[in-house]
Amino acid sequence: MSVSMKGNVIVGQSGGPTAVINSSLAGVYKTAMDRGANKVYGMLHGVQGLLEERVVDLADHIKSDLDIDLLKRTPSSFLGSCRYKLPDIKDGTELYDKIFKILEKLEIEYFFYIGGNDSMDTIKKLSDYALLNGSQIRFMGVPKTIDNDLAVTDHTPGFGSAAKYIASITKEVIRDGLVYDQEQVTLLEIMGRNAGWLTGAAALAAGEDCEGPDMLFLPEITFDVDGFMKKVTDLQKVKKSVVVAISEGVKVADGRYVCELTDNIDYVDAFGHKQLTGTSRYLAQRISREMGCKTRAIEFNSLQRCASHIVGRVDITEAFQVGGAAVKAAFEGETGKMIILKRVSDDPYICVTDIYDVHKIANVEKKVPREWINEDGDYVTQEFVNYVRPLIQAELTPIMVDGLPRHLRLEDV
């Protein structure tokens, strides 16, 4: 028998968005309302907005089943996001007091945060503070990140759609490279600071109608610029069009990012993350200068995290499910946990939700296993492809209006 909730709910989104992050928001909202929630509030721009008491009643903005369907298909973060690092509890008592006073004012009993590694750090700290101070508010993490680097969970919602986009565009770029009868090298720069899941997904482009990229370089393997140049030179001797996918986060032996070899990177976020860009441009310039051939540097950049027009049905469905599962777990008494996905079967693909202690997930990065990268460090293995392929399956057609996808906007805030 389902448990009917009492009190109010608040939900926020944090970190970089995905094409399906709003499907998780829809899962939280619909499940909470179906279980009798009094109000479901949304934090505008995550915990940073909460500190400024910037909240909305989601019932004022999600008014129908059509709105739910639109929200699931809407890219970016409907509520806005932030990269705000909470201090350690012992160093931020006044800040935590302020947060909990705001939550008490709103009569919040259930707090949900949709995000990646840094967001789970927020859930860990808030649930610990609640425990130390006798608060009955329950805190649950809802996983999201295109980077697929959250520990314990088989994969993260958002990764599948990003992988689908990357593999699709890689196929198209490979075809484009064959248009002219001339030598050229195309470098695809793909997101991934420390984990190469997204770059590896470019390998899915290979099939009966496409040879796939020639090389893949992941941040798990130290990048040798001179070795790379030799490999490109050797490839150019046997084929005119060379396509290479490379992670923005590849580093040389001394620990510097490749993109730091020519450009200074000044912007650093609250979690100490440098903004990475320019890896493909640096390598393309060097190839052009030393090899004298045409080069293209293509940065997928934010496109890989907002391309909701090519969202995967598996991904958007699982994103909705983890939102609903978080609500169910919290209503049943869980706190300080994150919803995880557990793969039961590859063929047929079956994945179920479970709950896991957020303390064992926060600040732990899941990288591509070394055995899923080939010995030369310039491609992924078939095991990697087999892992990712079920996650890109099926499609969810956008709701089209006047020839373009329709999205749900947060009005008048």
Image (tube, helix red, strand yellow):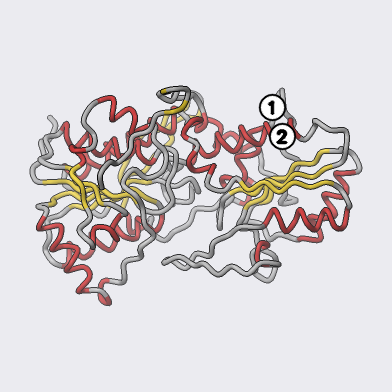
**Image coordinates for residue 159, horizontal then vertical, percent:** 49, 41
Toward the viewer: 290 or 218?
Answer: 290
Where residue 121 is drawn, which disc sits there? none
What residue did someone put label 1 on? 207
Tell me which residue sits at (84%, 33%) in the image: 180
Mark 1 or mark 2, which has the lower sequence index? 1
Tell me which residue sits at (35%, 56%) in the image: 119
Would residue 269 be found to the left or right of residue 24 on screen? right
Q: Amino acid at mark 2?
A: Gly
Toward the viewer: 7 or 74?
Answer: 74
Query: Could you classify mark 2 by the number of other residues whose Cα lies within 10 Å: few (under 14), some (14-19), or many (20 or more)?
Result: many
Where residue 212 is drawn, which disc sits there? 2
Query: Could you classify mark 1 by the number of other residues whose Cα lies within 10 Å: few (under 14), some (14-19), or many (20 or more)?
Result: few
Q: Quadrant of residue 186?
A: top right
**Image coordinates for residue 194, horizontal then vertical, percent:** 56, 57
**Image coordinates for residue 352, horizontal then vertical, percent:** 36, 34
Tell me which residue sits at (48%, 45%) in the image: 146
**Proximity of marks 1 and 2: CB atoms separated by less than 8 Å:** yes
